[in-house]
Image: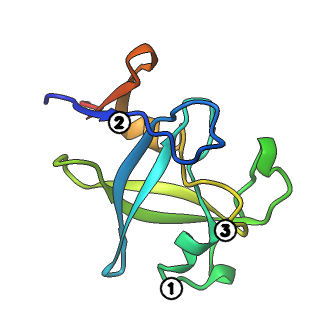
Amino acid sequence: MNPATFPYVQRQAIDLAPRPMLPIRLERDQRVIDVSGLVDSGAMLSVLPDQVGAAFGVEWASLPDAPLGGIARGLPAKFLAVRGTVASFPTVDLLFAWAKSDDLPLILGYYNFFRVFDVCFRARQNLFDIRPRTP
């Protein structure tokens, strides 16, 4: 399967450099949200900001706790499974840590975004390529 190519994006004037922001469709229980997430090869977990996670209408207390590290260490978070679609690729199961904060971007990290997609960063060209992993 051929990769889909995306440009790096400079979201705000205060950003020091453009970032690999991926448009992605997230779905759960017939609720669909189109968002952009930071593709972060250094993040152990994928993270949903509070507002995005809450839009799925899931009871926070019913979900298992998720440990956050780095700058999000200590924030309350719960694991939330959703379905995700990138470009015209087949929809995949994704696992996020839904953080009780809107100060974080939506992050696409190792678990489990990088386990279901191969990513090639071409930072000098401000581009990145994504394709589903093949077994």
Q: Is residue 110 above or below residue 67?
A: above
- Residue at the (50%, 80%) spot, across then down: 55
What amino acid is at disc 3?
Pro
What amino acid is at disc 2?
Phe
Label disc, if present, on residue 64 of the rendered structure: 3
Q: Within 10 Å of the Cα at label 1, are there few (<14), some (14-19), or many (20+) other Cα atoms? A: few
Report whether 53 appears left or right of 85.
Answer: right
Q: Earlier in the sequence, mark 2 or mark 1?
A: 1
What amino acid is at disc 1?
Gly
Q: Is residue 79 above or below residue 70?
A: below
Q: Nearer the viewer, residue 21 or 61?
A: 21
Q: Is residue 53 visible?
A: yes
Q: Is residue 121 above or below residue 1?
A: above
Label 2: state its secondary structure.
Answer: strand
Q: Is residue 106 above or below residue 51?
A: above
Distance of mark 2 from mark 1, alpha carbons? 27 Å
Label 3: state its secondary structure.
Answer: loop
x, y percentage for residue 53? 55, 72
- Residue at the (35%, 33%) spot, across then down: 7
Q: Nearer the viewer, residue 78 or 100?
A: 100
Label disc, if present, on residue 81 of the rendered structure: none
Dividing the picture into quarters, in which one does residue 124 lie? Answer: top left
Q: Decide: marks 2, 1 in contact (CB < 8 A)?
A: no
Label disc, if present, on residue 117 of the rendered structure: 2
